[in-house]
Amino acid sequence: MAIGRDVYVDSRMIVQRLEELYPDDSKFPMLSSEESAGLGALLNKFVIDGSVFSKGVGIMPADSRIDSKFVKDRAGFYGKQWNIHDTVKHKPENMAHLRQCFEIAESLFVDNRDWFAGTSNPTLADLEGVWAFAWILSDLQPPPKYFSKAIYPKVYAWCERFHAAVQSAHARAPTVVSLKGSEAVPFLLQRPFAKLDPVVDPSDPLQLRRGALVDLYPTDGGGFTHQDRGTLVKLTKDEVAIEVHAPTGEAVYIHAPRWSFRIEEVAPRAKLA
């Protein structure tokens, strides 16, 4: 997501920034709340670090039905040695892991709540978890003898409620204007920066200084092809921002969360690419 020349590269940062820009109202309730903040973080860890997503990849059919763009994207994250055929060799093991994950999710709705945090509307806690379960059930079509409405009725109902909520939000939202990349880039570069509090925490464990040349990349994959190099302009316990330059010379700020992102200082002799 780009707001002016500030680019946000992770969905968690994107949601956080949108929540700050658009306060709560009756038409578009905020996703963040005191009830959902901690639960959302836990569900994020469950889905990503708890391997719901990666085990889902491991039950994909290793045939021509797999989108080649998806395979290329995953190889870029996990390294050139990664391929879908090796991943699905352990399909039965991955299936067993996912059954445990679905049982955990099913138990979280034992009191018949509609949403994960017990709220009247979906919150960040739902957003952090439901996407992976919905993807597995809708796109991967796992064997019905292991995954069905009869076995996990509450998980299926959760996914259906969320899908309906998304459709309702789309119906209320303004019409989306699409831009091609060739149009979007100059549009972005002509815009100003958003307001940035240029704080580099001196007590941060990394002990980096403002203006340090650093590499920034996700640790849950992406260290091979998804790196950005720039000068450090912000570093807090929750956020990092670096300044990079377009080929035409304009500066752009790239923002990322601290969670699952690595920041490594580059030797002074290195040069910007």
Image: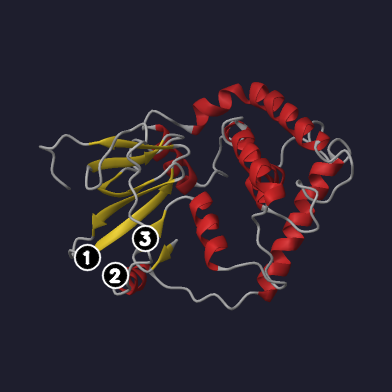
Residue that badge 3 annotates: 196
- Pointer 3: residues within 10 angstroms few (<14), some, or many (20+)? few
Name the one closer to the observer, 10 or 265: 265
Residues under labels 3 and 2: Cα distance?
17 Å
Q: Residue at x 89, y 45 (%)?
A: 112
Q: Residue at x 43, y 30 (%)?
A: 82
Residue 115: image location, x then y, percent: 78, 50
Q: Residue extending furthest left?
A: 269
**Three-letter amino acid code of the residue under disc 2:** Leu
Q: Residue at x 42, y 43 (%)?
A: 72
Q: Nearer the viewer, mark 3 or mark 2?
A: 3
Verify CB contact (< 8 Å) between mark 2 and mark 1: yes
Of the image marks 3 and 2, the number of the one nearer the N terminus? 2
Verify CB contact (< 8 Å) between mark 3 and mark 1: no
Write down the quadrant of residue 147 in the picture.
top right
**Three-letter amino acid code of the residue under disc 1:** Glu
Residues under labels 2 and 1: Cα distance?
7 Å
Residue that badge 1 annotates: 250
- Pointer 2: residues within 10 angstroms few (<14), some, or many (20+)? some
Kindly tell me whether residue 272 is visible in this rendering: yes
- Please tell me whether mark 2 sits on a helix, a strand or a loop: helix
- Please tell me whether mark 1 sits on a helix, a strand or a loop: loop
Residues under labels 3 and 1: Cα distance?
17 Å
Residue 245: image location, x then y, percent: 22, 58
Tell me the quadrant of the picture where the N terminus can be found. Answer: bottom left
Residue 197: image location, x then y, percent: 37, 57
Residue that badge 2 annotates: 189
The vertical placement of 8 against 109, above or below, is below
The vertical placement of 131 against 146, above or below, is below
